Amino acid sequence: MTAPMTTGLRTASSISCVMPAYNEAGNLNHVVPHVLSALKQLCGRVELIIINDGSKDTTEQVLAELCRTHPELIALNLSRNFGKEAALTAGLDTATGDVTVIMDADGQHPADLLPLMLQKWEQGIDVVFAVRKTRHDQSKLQIAFTSLFYRLINWRTRVQIPANAGDFRLMDSAVVKALRQLPERNRFMKGLYAWVGHPSIAIDYEPLARADGKSNFGFRGAMSLAMTGLLAFSVAPLRLVSYFGLLLSMAALGYGAWVVFDYFWFGADTPGYATIVVGMMFLSGIQLLSIGILAEYVGRIYEEVKQRPTYLLHSKTGSGLNQP
């Protein structure tokens, strides 16, 4: 059994690793032994918590077999697909280590960064998160939308969410405890990480190639998550509509003043039928857009007041740090 590292100001006596998985049966047989080996080199007591988020392939069966081989493994099978944010919440609710690492189950998060992350934690940094150096695997449209998203969500807000930072991170147990206290159902974990605060530092990384299959998180999923993030952590859409309404009102007053001046000063005829029709259609569109934005906020309020659980657990296998 490897002794805990003691190179810094504090030492981790146990490490938890949370890993959500959806249709990752082809990757788990490689990823699980690799990540467990990397964790055991850092600490003698480790656990790997894999959350099967309602996978449609053989992920559940593969996890059951891996649990028999690796006593450090805990498999959480959710009752259906609740989404990655809910799966992460389930994993964090289960983690009991002094520090908790979050990684993806597709093998794209390099385990070689774990020693550096733990070293930063030992030096007193509670959150060490990885930031992508490049986005070569994404289209220019996705990159543009990502940049726009972070500009909007960080616009005039107290809590700044680091751009290009994903879920790959190491957190102190105090941070995990704080995250458990947040009750919202519409969860945007990148925002919640930033909201709870604590000393943090970013490190660069380059994602590895997937060992098997293709990503289950496409452009549509990214847009849905971005909408959840914007509505959960920013009032920017409401402010933009308010500012746009103010500009339209000022433009309307200015145009009205010009029409009156033009009529009395130059004697110009002002039939204005086309102007009236176009103006009515334009303003009607703005009103519908504004109502739609308000409806998105109200819909999320409706989801919150129902107070349904973030996830439902179907079964649990393995004991992790609680093994005899």
Image (spheres, rainbow, N blue to C red):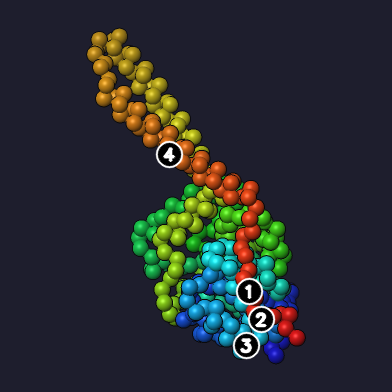
Q: What residue type is labelled 3?
A: Arg
Which label lies toward us, 4 or 1?
1
- The answer to whether residue 287 is visible is yes
Which sits in the foreground, 208 or 64?
64
Q: Horizontal and vertical percent for residue 242?
A: 49, 34
Residue position for label 1: 315
Graded by Cα atoms within 10 Å as few (under 14), some (14 to 19) or many (20 or more), the crowding at tag 4 reads: few
The one nearer the camera, 54 or 197, is 54
Residue 279 in the image: state x and y as whole percent: 33, 27
- Mark 3–mark 1 distance (CA, rounded to whole Å): 15 Å
The residue to which callout 2 is attached is 318
Q: What residue type is labelled 4?
A: Leu
The kind of residue on which mark 2 rests is Gly
Read off the residue under disc 3.
68
User: Alpha-carbon distance for marks 2 and 4?
Assistant: 50 Å
Q: Which residue is drawn at 41% across and 66% down?
A: 135
Q: Do the residues labelled 2 and 4 touch (CB within 8 Å)?
A: no
* Mark toward the start of the polypeptide (4 vs 1): 4
User: Which x, y percent locates residue 208?
Assistant: 45, 76
For discs 2 and 1, the disc positioned in front in the rendered view: 1
Disc 1 residue type (three-letter): Ser
Split into 4 quadrants, where in the image is the N terminus? bottom right
Mark positioned earlier in the residue sequence (2 or 3)? 3
Q: Quadrant of residue 185?
A: bottom right
Tell me whether circle 2 and circle 1 mark residues in contact (CB < 8 Å): no
Q: 199 or 252, which lies in front?
A: 252
Q: Name the residue under label 4.
A: 289
Alpha-carbon distance for marks 2 and 3?
Answer: 8 Å
Q: Distance between the residues labelled 4 and 3?
A: 54 Å
Q: Is mark 3 on a helix, strand or loop?
A: helix
